[in-house]
Image (cartoon, grey):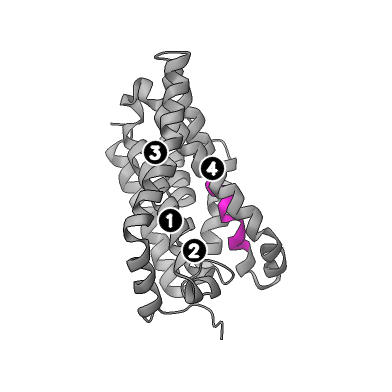
Amino acid sequence: MQFGVRTLLLAQAVCAVFCALLTVIGVLAVVVALLATVILASVRVSPKGAPLKRMIVDLMGGIVLPCFCLYYDPVLFGVGGPLVARSGFVVFPYFFLGFQMMALLVWLPAEPWVGRWGSVFAGSHFVGALIAVSLGTLLLPFSIIGVVLIIGVLGLVPFLTAFVFLRSGLTALRRARSHGKGAGVSGGITVGILLAVAIPLAAYWAFGEPMGRVIEAVPWPRPFPFD
């Protein structure tokens, strides 16, 4: 297995602590988790502890924190926010982000066995990194203003997410190149990019409108008032 049982249990313990903090201090727990993840990503650990560090950083930076960032975002994508409340089109990026999260969940345990197929994951992850950087850049002015209220720090989550996907993409690319070079790797990257774009687009075409109606109709709890 890519990750041992001990690593999985410790990662679950970290997630449990985060959930407990979330219950007690709300959005501040997300800010604390973001800072802790950034610190963890920047420190060196022993080779024995590297898998646990990587799993925590990837899960928190690539999946958990982005989800809460979307929920608490008071500018564009937050539940009950201006764009969600006034446009069903907001579900469009949800499909892209959801696909990237699922790809990361598949990649983490499958990495040792992907072989030449790693180039497909590389293409997909590179798209995820690009999307994350684009969102982070879009939110950056609001993040700078909102830092005074602490909540603006969450606008920096996309940059951590971009780091996670870029690192995973480069790792996948190295895996693919160790099993083959040239057109095969380039073709796999192209396939990964096409899948990362085509599948969310197809899902949006099939389910976007009804999902948008559900989001607008359901009385979601709103973390911040917009009216």
Q: Earlier in the sequence, mark 2 or mark 4?
A: 2
Q: Earlier in the sequence, mark 2 or mark 3?
A: 2
Q: Earlier in the sequence, mark 3 or mark 1?
A: 1
Determine the secondary structure under disc 2. helix
Residues tagged 2 and 4 counted as in contact (Cβ below 8 A): no
Q: Main secondary structure of the magenta part?
A: helix
Frontmost of labels 3 and 1 is: 3
Residue 52 in sight here: no
Residue type marked 2 = Leu
Q: What residue range appears in magenta?
A: 153-162
Q: Which residue is mark 1?
A: 64
Q: CA distance from mark 4 to mark 1?
A: 16 Å
Q: CA distance from mark 2 to mark 4?
A: 16 Å
Q: Earlier in the sequence, mark 4 or mark 1?
A: 1
Determine the secondary structure under disc 1. helix
Viewer-closest of 19 and 191: 191
- For the C terminus, the image quarter is bottom right
Determine the secondary structure under disc 3. helix
Compared with 126, 179 (above or below) is above
